[in-house]
Image: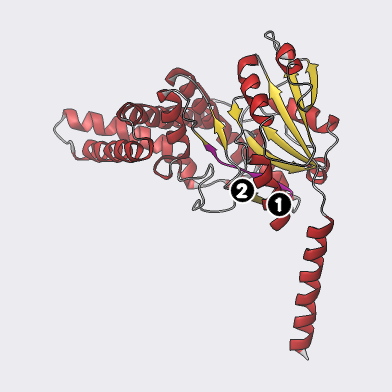
Amino acid sequence: MQTIYGLHFLFVVIFVDSLKIIFLKLSFSIIIPVYNRPNEIDELIESLTKQDFSDDFEVLIIEDGSENSSKEIVKNYENQLDLKYFFKENSGAGASRNFGMQEAKGNYFIILDSDVIVPKHYLSEVKNALEKNFTDAFGGPDAAHESFTATQKAINYSMTSVLTTGGIRGKKKAVGKFQPRSFNLGLSKKAFEKTNGFADLKVGEDIDLTFRLWKNGFETQLIESAFVYHKRRSTVKQFFKQTFAFGTARPQLNKRYPTTAKITYWFPSLFIIGFDISCISAIFGYWQLLAFYGFYFCLIFLDSLFQNKSLQVAFLTVITTFTQHLGYGLGFLESKFLKKNR
């Protein structure tokens, strides 16, 4: 009897899932906030015109109080896409994304940063993945386009490699539940209405949203094939400022969501402290710890060389990886001990 009930329950589950797939009609609205980046938005919109996607979709450009407007760029594509342009006072990327989702017609929002380029298969991959395994939120990885500068390729490696970040930003073998990032993120209208979208945070607003999605019972997934080409920052100095900001955000998020805090968030800070100690120790003849760092950076160099096939990129990867640890580690320590968390 229990077996019969079990089979009946399994049949109902399969039947309900099948109905969900049959009647699920995805309608995409692409939300893109932009701030003083008309050239980048030009490349992104152009890439959206080349999608191998037969369904209708709309694109909403949210100009966040820019002094260097993208309005004329957007006009060039009005006959090629269902394109809408909005100008609003500067309030930050999170608020601009929320504004776009409030104005959107679709039932599933795709949020992109203005500094990405979308491969032609992107929307098709998203649709296929959601029809096979629907979740109310998803994230996709990023990659370096062949046209990117050597520094941008090095930064991309440092932000995505298993040897640097553990692969948490889009590698299939990443440990734990996937946390989507706002440069390439999908969110259902239902989930947006339940969570009210992005919180009023300058940095870490995408991670904050993920935690609130989980708290409200929504699932997230990584769609590995739905990647974008992400330019990120163009110089090492800009990259340092970005990673420093990431570091300052983490203690604030830990305070908001204490159960999500992990010892791994301390690793960049410990890495930098250990490097300082190893340099001082080497002065007094104890070079063993410094040798460990040398081995690590040699490993980074060789892995980057294997992946990028460029000595220049491999060398720059050593610099950007150290910059990443330094920026995040110092930002984390400052926010943890010197600033009052919000």
Give the residues in magenta.
133-142
Q: Tell me the crowding category of disc 2: few under 14, some 14 to 19, or many 20 or more residues within 10 angstroms, Cα based.
A: many
Name the residue rendered at 23%, 39% in the picture: 289
Where on the picture, by quarter, is residue 276? top left
Above or below, 97 relative to 191: above
Q: Mark 1 or mark 2, which has the lower sequence index?
A: 1
Q: Main secondary structure of the magenta part?
A: loop
Residue at 74% over, 42% down: 187
Q: Is residue 88 above or below residue 299?
A: above
Residue 138 part of the magenta-drawn span: yes
Residue 287, magenta (yes or no):
no
Q: Quadrant of residue 12?
A: bottom right
Determine whether label 1 and label 2 are within 8 Å by CB. yes
Q: Which residue is mark 2?
A: 223
- The percent coordinates of residue 201 (x first, y second) are 67, 29
The residue nearer to you, when weighing 100 against 330, is: 100
Q: Amino acid at mark 2?
A: Ile
Q: Residue at x 62, y 22 (%)?
A: 43
Colouring method of the image:
secondary structure
- Camera-side residue of 333 and 186: 186
- Find the distance from the CA under tag 1 to the CA under tag 2: 9 Å
The tag on residue 130 is: 1
Identity, as a three-letter code, of the amino acid under mark 1? Leu
